[in-house]
Image: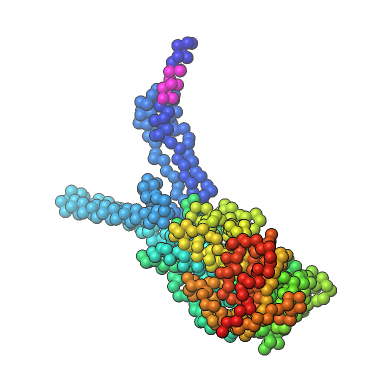
Amino acid sequence: MACARLRLNQSLQRISSCNLSFSRLVSPVRHASTSGKNVASSSKVSVPMALAVALGAGGLSYVVADILFPQKKPTVILSGKLSSVVSPSEKNQAVTDNPIENHKAEHDVISSQEASKEETLEFTSKTDNQKSSTGQNDPESTQVVNENTRDQNTTSSSTQEQQLSSPLPLAATYVIIGGGPAAFFAIRGIMDRDKTAKILIISSEQHVPYARTPLSKELWFQDSAADGFTFIDWGNRRREKPTFYQTAEELMLSEEPGVAIITNTRVTAIDHFDKILDLDDGRSVLYSKCLIATGGRPKSLSIFDSSPDLKQRVVLFRTLDDYTRLRALSDEGKSVAVVGGGFLGSELAVALSNNARARSGKVSQIFPEYGNMAQILPQYLCEWTTKKVTSFGVNVYSNSRVKAADMDGEQVALHLDTGAVVKADYVLVAVGMEPNIELAQQSGLEIDPVKGGILVNSELEARRDIWAAGDVASFYDITLGRRREEHHDHAAVSGRLAGENMAGARKPYFHQSIFWSDLGSSVGFEAIGIVDSSLQTVGVWARATELDTPKAAVETGNIRGGIDEADPAATSSVEAASKATNETIDVNDPTEFGKGAVFYLRDKKVVGVVLWNVFNKMPIARRLIREGKTYEDLSELTKVFRLHESKE
């Protein structure tokens, strides 16, 4: 018994000593699919290994076992997204850190195999001809063999050609998901740093990227033939539809840099391990750098979901198609009830009323606050603004909520909590927006639980080689803390910076973005920072002239928001003309707020500024917030913008 135990221990020691070398020969095969979800692995004990253990011998037993029981070469099924005729060994030889280069390498391997196949066929044909000429084979049998060989070669060749002719996955170094202003300016940022860039945009809309601000402003004050791309802005500049976009196929076939767009298509998943995007049409896209600029969608109210007929009478306003529909209804003289008293609802109420004057249409506006833009403006200015909106012909229902809605014949009846009933042909709901974060959530990106956007670092990067910009990004403001902005200026600047960082700039984002709103062409304001009417405010006012309007400011060289879609590198540098008097408005009894500035304070520090019909002063307001100065004497703020200085 002791001798048996000794022999068993010696055998176990020999097996243990062979473990390392065996593990190198028979290692588990692991492969992660391109979906990033399924992992196939094989770690079963092979027949040779079992036999070797049974023999209790060293490495020689494995050699004997392999001779007696030869194994097939381990194989792994390639992902359906990238499967081709490339063998696993050849595929591994071509792998690099760049998926675009991998994609090209696989295609090169396929081409090399095809060339090798053609050479083999040519050599076989020559050999057969030589044998035939020397009479070494029977003619009849030779004919049968040649026909069989030809059939096999034809089948193999046709299969290879089919694999080569089948469309390979789309690929681009830079891929942008979304078709809004952030996407447009990201293109500029990328191309500024990478002159050889190949950029692919994937948009759920049917249009190329466009600016959304004119949809509630300039377009309503000119001929309805304006299509959102070709129109005259406040500064009498003609805007044209860009023509540099290519199709995805053109970009793939071209060796030159370019920008392509795929419209009416959504990205359903991001595989950030293999850098592959899945599209809702079944295609896949390889990327090296990806930007998520999916923006947001307008909120609705559940009371309008009670019936299909009622739901068809509700308009949500966000896109060019939304503008086209609403403009057509207004041009037909349809009455519209606007639900919402923010800056978008107020802008559209004024725009609709202006358009309805010549068409006998009626416009109503309903909101729960005491006045227009009450969440932004101090009460005295809010009340003045409500009177201004009313002067445009809008029937304003303040301090009112819609508690029920139903169809009354061919009109929608809105039942208010005040007991009033407002009837209209259509209802425009403008009660805010929510970011499109579903794609990010499904793809495992981190979401801000408070702000609701995609969490990004100071360089707008959500994770390696994936950036987010515009409405959907939750970024850290070094002055005001973590924020998520839903305005054009932020979309433009963050989109451009993200594009530069995709191309290797590595710049931090510290821009204090602004937004602006116009009530027609005569009243406009620009705001920056935290503008919340619940904060302490200090207002400084002066009388205005005909030159202190949004239209006049643009005509004299001002660029609204500091960003010009036609020339994004340009910024406002022209001082607006002004002939204001030295008379100061008494805010306790105001009759007219022509021009002024409202400072929003928290802990005696300026955290936000609204400039009312004051233009080209945003750099000063931005610096004021960045400095974070404590103001013990608030009268110092009256000297910041020098509103009462006369300029000839």
The chief SS type of the magenta part is helix
Side of 256 relative to 530 (left or right): left
Is residue 283 visible in this depiction of the protein?
no
Instruction: Residue at 68% x, 62% y: name it.
Output: 632
Q: Which residues, given as a range, are shown in magenta? A: 8-17
Q: Is residue 307 above or below residue 272?
A: below
Q: Is 16 colored magenta in this rendering?
A: yes
The percent position of residue 174, horizontal first and vertical second, equals: 45, 61
Figure quadrant of residue 195:
bottom left
Q: Is 506 colored magenta in this rendering?
A: no
Outermost left residue: 134
Figure quadrant of residue 428:
bottom right
The percent position of residue 89, horizontal first and vertical second, equals: 37, 45
Q: Nearer the viewer, residue 272 or 546?
A: 546
The percent position of residue 507, horizontal first and vertical second, equals: 49, 59
Q: Nearer the viewer, residue 555 or 159?
A: 555
Instruction: Residue at 29% x, 55% y: name it.
Output: 115
